[in-house]
Amino acid sequence: MNQSSTNRIRKIVIAGGGTAGWMSAAALSSMLSPDNVQIVLVESEEIGTVGVGEATIPDIVNFNRMLGIDEAEFLKATKGTFKLGIEFSDWGKLGDKYFHPFGNHGADMNGIDFHQYWLHTRQAGNTNSLEEYSMCAVAAKSMKFALPNDNPRSLLSQIGYAYHFDATSYALFLRKYAEKRGVIRIEGRIEQILLNEQTENISALVMQNKKRVEGDFFFDCTGFQSKLLGQTLGVPFQDWSKWLPCNSAQAVASKRQGELLPYTKSMAKTAGWQWRIPTQHRTGNGHIYSTDFMDDQQATDVLMQGLDAPALSDPRTIRFTTGCRDKFWHKNCVSIGLSSGFLEPLESTSIFLIQQGISRFIALYPSLTPPAKVVEEYNRLMTREFHQVRDFIILHYKATQRTDSEFWRYCKNMSIPDSLQHKMELFQCAGRVFRDDHELFSTSSWVAVMMGQNIYPETAEPMLLGVPIQNIEQSLQSMQRAMQQTSLKMPTHAEFIKNYAGSSI
């Protein structure tokens, strides 16, 4: 960071705490010395956080490692569990069930995707599902878990995992981390945001007690309100409700009972879907729905009927609009988390998008007066990220055969972005998935959802037509047996947590 002393950021102010605020504070404090840059976070204990239990994707493992966080200590502090993927029920049609694993399906051979080999055996009569060739899916179904290893010959090297945890506990964990590294926390509500008359940059936050918190650069982590970027700087919001019609959620925790699942459950309902997220001490539940197709009382009834154990409180309702800001960085402000946009938690991408916002900022760390190209590049990258995640989530709704309710008929027949339409048509032709550079979701992810929701290619890979089918079948049978044997030797998820994180499970 070769910046002259007169043109460098000396003070960063983070408006808002929660997961977004404290992840930002922790990451920045791990990279910046408090002697050079002061980091201040302003939050109010009166303002609650969104969510009951948090599900993540594997990128969070790298984020925690970047901060030097001990995994076992983190799991113990956040009452966390491991997650090998997501089980989807009733999405393609009523009675359907499939698993989206974090690891790959099988192993690609001769430069050809594994699912193409499976498609050839399916046409020859193989009745085994694709997920029976995924180490993550096989382990998850057996309630087993083990950490991956670095031996490419070991099937454990194919394990990809993330976490379930208590989001409030994670924010507190990161707060301790950040404060040890010099981050200053100020308690109180933000009452006013002041702008510099010449530059129209944000100059200070005014607290309820009239105290001014001045800064050179500001992070907007104020949630759906987007007090800085949206309300004060006037950056417009792109509404994606026509593709993602759900606009409400009801969330409630329930007692944990039965086996400890190493995966999230997503169960499609009449006008949306319900999640089940297992942590060590309780289960997080929520019902995402559209008020255009279901009223709040009906939604509450669906949620409570879908619990597997008694609720620990009354459900709370959260309203939202899916979409994102036209810009994520404007003037001297970056928006992180819900203030930048919201994509429902169907694929557990909320924390990933927070991570991306933080890591892009660090990679493009600016001077006091950043070049326009730096800001443009940040906005380009974050816009691309949101659009790619958006398309993957829309796929789940569009790729349905359900016609049992007005909601599902709407989703089945709605128009979708051209970028997603192209991917779906290309896959239907010959099972091919072409991804953009640095796209979050892998080929295995796209294949899992498309075929899990009954989009099967019209033809399989022509390059395999000359390969004897019995050779392919033998390879797949050997792979399936090896995965089953490996799973048998793994500890249960509950046993692993108990020994690894000192849990009382």
Image (cartoon, grey):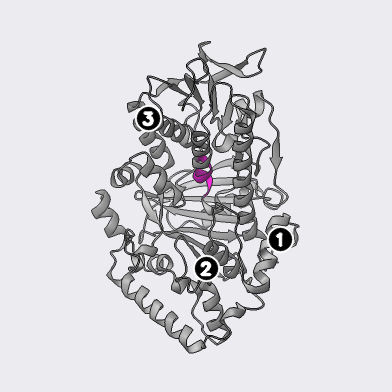
Disc 2 to disc 3, C-alpha distance: 40 Å
Depth check: give the residue in front, 199 or 81.
Answer: 199
Neighbor class of circle 1 (other Cα within 10 Å; few <14, some 14-19, many 20+) is some
User: Does 268 sit left or right of 175 as displayed?
Assistant: right
Label at residue 396: none
Q: Which residue is mark 2?
A: 98
Dividing the picture into quarters, in which one does residue 446 lie?
bottom right
Q: Residue at x 34, y 27 (%)?
A: 181
Label 1, label 2: how many angstroms apart (C-alpha)? 22 Å
Q: Is residue 353 part of the magenta span, yes or no?
A: yes
Query: Which numbered disc, 1 or 2, marks the residue that appears first in the sequence?
Result: 2
**Which residue was labeled with disc 3?**
178
Q: The residue tagged with tag 1: helix, strand or loop?
A: helix
Instruction: Please give left or right for residue 38 compared with residue 349 in the image.
Output: left
Which residue shows up at 47% across the image and 18% down it? Answer: 10
Where's residue 167, x and y in %? 43, 41
Range of magenta residues: 349-354
Q: CA distance from mark 3 to mark 1?
A: 43 Å
Q: Nearer the viewer, residue 377 or 249?
A: 377
Label 3 Cα crowd, 10 Å radius (few <14 / some 14-19 / many 20+):
many
Residue 34 % position (x, y): 38, 22
Residue type for callout 2: Tyr
* Residue named by callout 1: 421
Residue under the image location 53 percent in, 62 percent down: 445
Determine whether label 2 and label 3 are within 8 Å by CB: no
Badge 3 or badge 1: first in the primary sequence: 3
The residue shown at (27%, 59%) is 495
CA neighbours of label 2 inside 10 A, class few (<14), some (14 to 19), many (20+): many
N-terminal of the pair, mark 2 or mark 3, is: 2
Tell me which amino acid carries mark 3.
Answer: Ala
- For residue 439: magenta? no
